[in-house]
Each structure stands twice: as C-alpha cells, then as structure tokens.
Image (cartoon, helix red, strand yellow):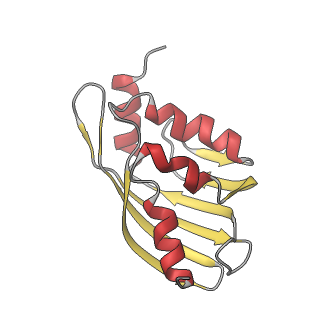
Amino acid sequence: MGNLRDDRIHLFSRLEDPATHGEFFARVSDDVHWTVMGTQPLGGTYFSKKAFREATFDRLARVMKEGVRLKLQRLYEDGDTAIVELLATSMTNDGAPFDNEYCWICRFDGEGPDALIVEVRAYLDSAMVAYAVARNERN
C-alpha cells in the first residue's frame, strides 16, 4: 500500500479525465464546505457536494468540448490539509484554450487513505471563467 502522499497524488490525478471524476468526488464529503473565490459566474460558497458540482463542474463541463480536465501540477501537504495546484487543459466549445490555473486548499477529515475532503477554498482566474461561460453557455 502506498503512503498518504501517493494516495493524494492519485486522488487529484482523477481530475485529469472526466471519466474518472467520479473517483475523485467519491472522496469528497456530501456536506463539503467549498468556496470558489472571485466574482465570476461560478464563484460562491457551496455547502454540499451536489450543490458544488451542479453550480461549477457540471456547468463548466457544458461549455467545454471534452469536459473539465484538471492536471495536477503540485501538491503540498501538512497533516489533514493539502494545497493543490492544478492546470486546466480543456478547450471551450468555441475553440479557445481554457488553460486556467487553480489553487485549492483542501482540508480532509483525517490523515488516512480513506479520508474525505470536507472543506476547500479554490482560487482561479476569474476573468477566464467569466469569458468562457459568457461565450459558450447556451441558455
């Protein structure tokens, strides 16, 4: 069995392919407290996994040709907290690269390999999100 760092690297690498997003979200608490910083359309605080996914991941996926793809760049950790840098490698429906950079500060409910993410503060390029949504979202 791998160590905790390997487990977390594996966990966040599940975001690179929309087909494996479910594996990532299985490790997110149903009542997660997730804050997306900024004044863009996805910004706000969500108090459940369902609310977060519907308002952010699912909404953003609809404006991307092949869904949301986030590649793990760096992982820093201390106890029950991980700081994760991710790079979006998606393409919008209108053909623009969506190379947004993210920094997520994630708190887990423990330090074990089955620990769930219970709190996230997500930082990103708000202008890029606003542009992608405005140009690609169909009402």
Taking the spot 41% from the left edge, 42% from the top edge, the residue there is 68
Find residue 71 and report its horizontal and vertical position in percent. Answer: 35, 58
Quarter occupied by residue 118: bottom right
Q: Position of residue 124 (x, y in %)?
A: 43, 54
Residue 127 in the figure: left or right of residue 27: left
Q: Is residue 109 above or below residue 128?
A: below
Q: Nearer the viewer, residue 10 or 99?
A: 10
Q: Residue furthest right?
A: 31
Residue shown at the point (61%, 77%) measured from the top left: 81
The answer to whether residue 86 shows anywhere in this view is yes
**Identity of the residue drawn at 44% across and 28% down:** 62
Tell me the quarter of the image containing the N terminus. Answer: bottom right
The residue at 69%/65% (across/down) is: 116
Answer with left or right where residue 126 lies relative to residue 114: left
Corner quadrant of residue 111: bottom right
| In this rendering, position of residue 28 left or right of residue 127 | right
Q: In this figure, what is the number of numbered marks?
A: 0
Q: Residue furthest front?
A: 1
Q: Position of residue 75 (x, y in %)?
A: 44, 75
The relative height of residue 45 versus residue 75 in the rendered view (above or below) is: above
